[in-house]
Amino acid sequence: MATARTKLIYQHNQDLRQHLSRVLSISPVSALPASDQSLLKNVSEDDYALITNETIFYVQGGGQPSDTGTITTSSSSSESETPSNSTFEVSAVRHPASGGAILHFGRFNPTNQANLKVGDEIQQSIDGQKRDLYSRLHTAGHILGLAINALMQNGTLPSTLVESKASHYPDSAAVEFVGLIESKHLAAIQAKTDEFVASARKVSIHWWSMERLRKGCLGVGDEFELPEGETEGRVVEMEGLGAYPCGGTHVATCDQVGKVEVRKISRSKGVSRVSYRVA
């Protein structure tokens, strides 16, 4: 398991909803190292961790929830072996504490048919509705961040604001900036966000060198670094508006996020949090 590495197919083709891959490892969560067991809450004897050579399941991180869905034995596998109606229902997907073997957490249905084994060809199927929502939320968060940066540039907001982090979860979507954003600016932020959404600019994925990434992206602090062994970073660009380093999934054009509602601006310990939702 330590030497296994899962290829993140969604980083190169985020439109796939189904994908064939192979099982590298399957084990009860209770058999994992304690550091990996802690990634899943309320573990029971029915919980398993599945590792595959490739995955279209988004791995939780970057403020975006993981995909959910199902994994079943592919038709080609079932032709040569006893067919099974067992389905592995994926509830969470996580990076391990160390290494690159992605953990697909879930349970077999029915629970007494945990019959996948190493080498099996499997069919991955993600929940497309959830993926579409998460993609809309993630792109919307970047558009909101770009709108705030544009208002900093035109003098509406303080130029000293520093973009820090974001959440793109449905119930807690927000972008955060170090510095003071007064509530009176909510209308201006909403108007600029609406403008950027209506622009319908293309949303593109690139792979850039660290030098180009630092020059061409917002939200890149001194502490930013590429994953170990990587020479290029994944970037999402709202063409003509700006770009961010990002491993998440996104819509194809800005208008596909739908209506973005800037809900409120809150402040705590020198940080302004601008909350939003999509409709």
Image (tube, rainbow, N blue to C red):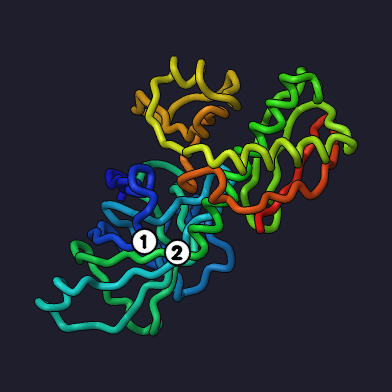
Tell how many labels: 2
Mark 1 and mark 2 lie on one chain; the one further toward the N terminus is 1
**Which residue is nearer to you in this view: 75 or 110?**
75
Q: Is residue 118 above or below residue 56?
A: below
Q: Is residue 121 above or below residue 254?
A: below
> Which residue corresponds to the image point at 69% horizontal and 39% vertical from the top-left?
193
Answer yes or no: do the residues labelled 1 and 2 have beta carbons within 8 Å?
yes
Q: Which residue is mark 1?
A: 17
Q: CA distance from mark 1 to mark 2?
A: 6 Å
Q: Is residue 173 above or below residue 107?
A: above
Query: Residue extending furthest left?
Result: 80
**Residue 249 in sight here:** no
| Numbered circle sitting on residue 128 | 2
Q: Please indicate whether residue 194 sits to the left or right of residue 214 in the image.
A: right
> Which residue corresponds to the image point at 55% horizontal and 43% vertical from the top-left?
254
**Residue 211 in sight here:** yes
> Which residue corresponds to the image point at 62% horizontal and 48% vertical from the top-left?
168
SS under mark 1: loop
> Which residue corresponds to the image point at 37% horizontal and 73% vertical from the top-left?
88
Instruction: Provide residue 220's location: percent of width, then percent of height.
Output: 57, 24
Crowding at mark 1 (Cα within 10 Å: few <14, some 14-19, many 20+):
some
Instruction: Provide residue 22's location: percent of width, then percent of height.
Output: 23, 59
**Which residue is nearer to you in this view: 189 or 165?**
189
Instruction: Locate the C terminus by quadrant.
Output: bottom right
Instruction: Provide residue 215's location: percent of width, then percent of height.
Output: 51, 16
| Numbered circle sitting on residue 275 | none
Identify residue type, mark 1: Arg
Instruction: Provide residue 45's location: percent of width, then percent of height.
Output: 46, 74
Q: Please indicate whether residue 25 sits to the left or right of residue 75 in the image.
A: right
Q: Please indicate whether residue 212 sits to the left or right of residue 27 in the image.
A: right
**Which residue is nearer to you in this view: 3 or 223?**
223
Identify residue type, mark 2: Gly
